[in-house]
Image (cartoon, helix red, strand yellow):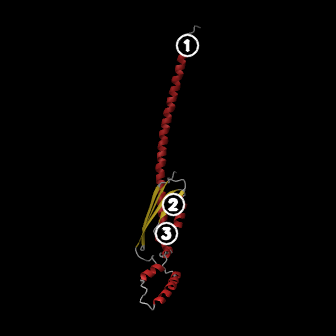
Amino acid sequence: MITSMTGFGLSKRNNKDFSIEVHFRSVNSRFFDLNIKLPHIISILEKEIHALSKEKCKRGTIQVYCRLKMKNDKMSIAKLNQEKLDSFYKMLLPINQKLTDTNFNLNLSFDNILSKLTDDDELYQLSPKHKKYILSTFDLALKDLLKSRIVEGKKIEKEIKSNIRKLNKINLKIIRLEDKNKRQHFENYVNRIKLILNDFDF
């Protein structure tokens, strides 16, 4: 069975926390080449998605796109960086002491302070349940891609077999023409020999 390296896979799923849509698109390539575009919230899964894709596809240039829409903020958890907090405090303390006897004061909003003290890389957390659900969605899209490549492979196989049948018909015509030409050449040679022999008196 022929399997094409050209195909498309799609998986759409929903749960109470988010909806997710995963697209796979592959084209022919001698080697495995994967280009992944993920929302920041699930970017930590890129290595696992890469390994899963390589295991399933082996070869081909593959584009992966994921769209994820949150239904609530349960997955968005801001984390305060304690080291940043301590450093920030140590920086502000002497400034505040110097300004105590003056008419100046520090005018910092709470939101501004928090933006400096949170880790963007740790802003989102994935529970084991969410992680499993998301990876299984990618797996379903990959399976859909593989089915698409099999369907495309069957079309290619059908086209190849059709071309082989056409070539066989052409080959048979050539053989028949060759046999006919051989007989014609043989008859021509016999007639020429007869003409030559008629010129001699035995």
Q: Are marks 2 and 3 in contact (CB under 8 Å)?
A: no
Q: State the residue in front, 14 or 187.
A: 14
* Secondary structure state at the residue bearing disc 2: strand
Which residue is denoted by mark 1 in the rendering? Answer: 196
Q: Is residue 47 visible?
A: yes
- Crowdedness near tag 2: few (<14), some (14–19) or many (≥20) residues, C-alpha within 10 Å: some
How far from the left and from the top, in percent, is residue 147? 47, 57
Q: Is residue 133 visible?
A: no
Q: Amino acid type of disc 3?
A: Ser
Can you identify the residue that label 2 sits on?
Answer: 34
Q: Which dot, 2 or 1, sits closer to the camera?
A: 2
Question: Pointer 2 and pointer 1: residues touching (CB < 8 Å)?
Answer: no
Vertical comparison of 66 with 110: above or below? above
Amino acid tagged 2: Leu
The residue shown at (45%, 68%) is 39
Question: How many angstroms separate mark 2 from mark 1 (CA)?
Answer: 78 Å
Task: Determine the CA span between mark 3 and mark 1.
Answer: 93 Å
Which residue is disc 3 drawn over?
Answer: 43
As drawn, 18 above or below 158: below
- Front of the two marks 3 and 1: 3
Q: Which quadrant would the C terminus be assigned to in this image?
A: top right
Provide the secondary structure element on which disc 3 rests: helix
